[in-house]
Image: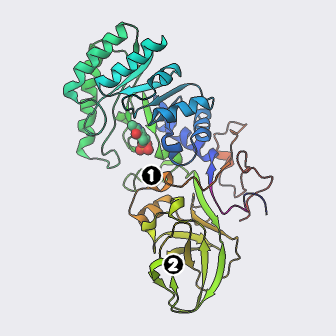
Amino acid sequence: MNETASLRARAEIDLAALRANVRALRERAAGAQLMAVVKSDAYGHGAVPCARAAREAGATWLGTATPQEALALRAAGIDGRIMCWLWTPGGPWREAVEAGIDVSVSDLWALREAAGAAAATGRTARVQLKADTGLGRSGCQPADWPHLVAEAREAERSGLVRITGLWSHFACADEPGHPSIAAQLAVFRDLVAHAEKEGVEPEVRHLANSPATLTLPESHFDLVRTGIAMYGVSPSPEVGTPADFGLRPVMTLAASLALVKDAPAGHGVSYGHHYVTPAETTLGLVPLGYADGVPRHASGRGPVLIGGKVRTAAGRIAMDQFVVDLGGDRPEAGADAVLFGPGDRGEPSVQDWAEAAGTIGYEIVTRIGVRVPRVYVNGADDPDGTGGGAERGTGARPARTQDHETAGGVKR
Ligand SMILES: *Cc1c(COP(=O)(O)O)cnc(C)c1O
């Protein structure tokens, strides 16, 4: 047994898959730059390793929600353009300006904090003006846009800020054909035209998230901001499967079976006894629970691959563990239980878990808890420049290059 095989559970992160996904998305949005969205610890995949891998694959921008996330990337030594957009009054504006991070501004208070930080540090704040083109969440309302643009231009003329971007976000890009998509595009074009008429010369105009990057070329403008697709998960089944777009799931969530035991017919299983063994059988204990991000809502439904068969969580998913009815099979304790992965071995997908829990794939991967170690595989960029493809699908286990490095492969 090597170190990885002895782990209770692990989230394997295939950085070659991530790099290949970035390259596939860049091809799809040829002519635009790509921002790798690594907010929320890269959707649970690990912000710093994923940011580095995305950079290697040509992501010229990194995006985070909070300024703390952006500053953490800088502190880890990641240079180049980084943008963050979820600000509150009194946030670390000075630190962000000093670190050369692009900051998003939806309102005058934020513009003033950015300009104030610039004045205090003697540096120019890189500011991106965000419009609400119809999402109804963050962003400046069209009615207020002229005022925000005018004040930003004034701050630009005084040297305090440089307006580096004009941007917005879609409401329904994951529902291709939704009427709000064309409406938002039209509003965005108007608001950009107004700002440019006022003298704004943005480096980047951007609107597309993953679903728009995949399905809506006219939304690509100068930059696409891809999150979920980069991790090889589809934004929604309506958009398609990852494979439809040449994307490969990056995360595999697996655990080591903690116990296999006999149980008689009529045995209640887990809290509340919501499952009762229909016949004499064997039970397997999977040492992952809702504290690890395995959704309790998937109790009685969540799928897991054990010994070549997909089983279903029997009864309640508890905080740290759940049980499967193995139907008489007797894998050994320590056998791999794979909750989701790319599917090479017939394991379920993130989307399967999303459906079992009544949620979306985004929530499944982002909620994998800190107690689950991330094991990075294929950390080094492929030296022969074949775009990562050569590292895939061979059946050979990839080299582990970061945490939990091992000389050999994982026990399968
Ligand atoms: C999270 C986020 C994205 C990425 O969305 P995906 O659907 O995961 O590609 C892009 N832009 C903004 C503003 C976001 O908050």
Identify the element where label 2 is drawn.
loop
Q: For this rendering, which residue is in front, 213 or 235? A: 235
Q: Is residue 329 visible?
A: no
Residue 347, quarter of picture: bottom right
Q: Which residue is labeled 1 in the image? A: 362
Task: Say which amino acid is labelled 1.
Answer: Tyr
Q: Is residue 75 magenta?
A: no
- Quick one: label 2, few (<14), some, or many (20+) residues within 10 Å? some
Q: Which residue is at a point 48% across and 46% down the rendered structure image?
A: 229
Task: Say which amino acid is labelled 2.
Answer: Ser
Left of 280 or right of it: where is 104?
A: left
Q: Is residue 289 visible?
A: yes
Image quarter where ligand 1 lies: top left
Q: Which residue is labeled 2 in the image? A: 270
Q: Is residue 10 magenta?
A: yes
The picture places residue 273, in percent across and down from the top left corner, at 46, 82
- Asked if the residue at label 1 sits under 8 Å from ligand 1, the reply is yes
Identify the element where label 1 is drawn.
helix
Looking at marks 2 and 1 on the same chain, the residue that comes earlier in the sequence is marked by: 2
Which mark is nearer the camera, 2 or 1?
A: 2
Whether tag 2 and tag 1 are in contact, CB under 8 A, the answer is: no
Q: Which residue is at a point 65% across and 74% down the rendered structure image?
A: 307
What residue span does the magenta drawing correspond to?
Answer: 5-11
